[in-house]
Image: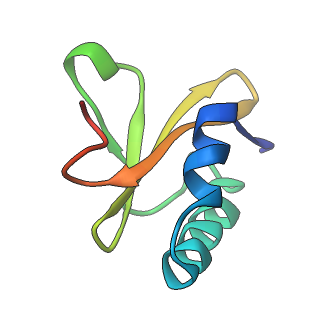
Amino acid sequence: MPVRITPEAYQQIAVLPVSTHRRVLSVLERLERWPTVSGAKPLRRELKGCFRVRTGDWRVVIRPQGQIVWVIAVDNRKDVYE
């Protein structure tokens, strides 16, 4: 399944430390196999319909829409849901 990255998420990925950047790229590769991605958890409230995939202290927030998986945020766990 194609994975698309929003401009906001792309900017967040661009400034990540190198080791975290590699881990996030690995998650993005895994997302191509959606919906069989291990560790994806559904979100609630304002983010209902979205899922998060964890990599260390970082979260990749995605929103599947039809045949496309949109990456809408990549941030530290303490800041991503704000």
Is the N terminus in the top left, top right, bottom left or bottom right quadrant?
top right
Query: Residue placed farthest to the front in the image?
Result: 15
Q: Quadrant of residue 13?
A: bottom right
- Note whether residue 6 is visible: no
Q: Position of residue 30 (x, y in %)?
A: 63, 64
Front one among 82 and 50: 82
- Note whether residue 56 is visible: yes
Is the C terminus in the top left, top right, bottom left or bottom right quadrant?
top left
Q: Position of residue 5 (x, y in %)?
A: 70, 40
Query: Residue placed farthest to the right in the image?
Result: 2
Q: Does residue 17 sit above or below 30 in this rendering?
A: below
Q: Position of residue 15 (x, y in %)?
A: 57, 61
Please report the residue visible at 70 percent of the width from the left and 21 percent of the height from the top. 66
Front one among 74 and 1: 74
Q: Position of residue 45 (x, y in %)?
A: 20, 16
Please report the residue visible at 62 percent of the width from the left and 73 percent of the height from the top. 26
Q: Does residue 69 sit above or below 39 in this rendering?
A: above
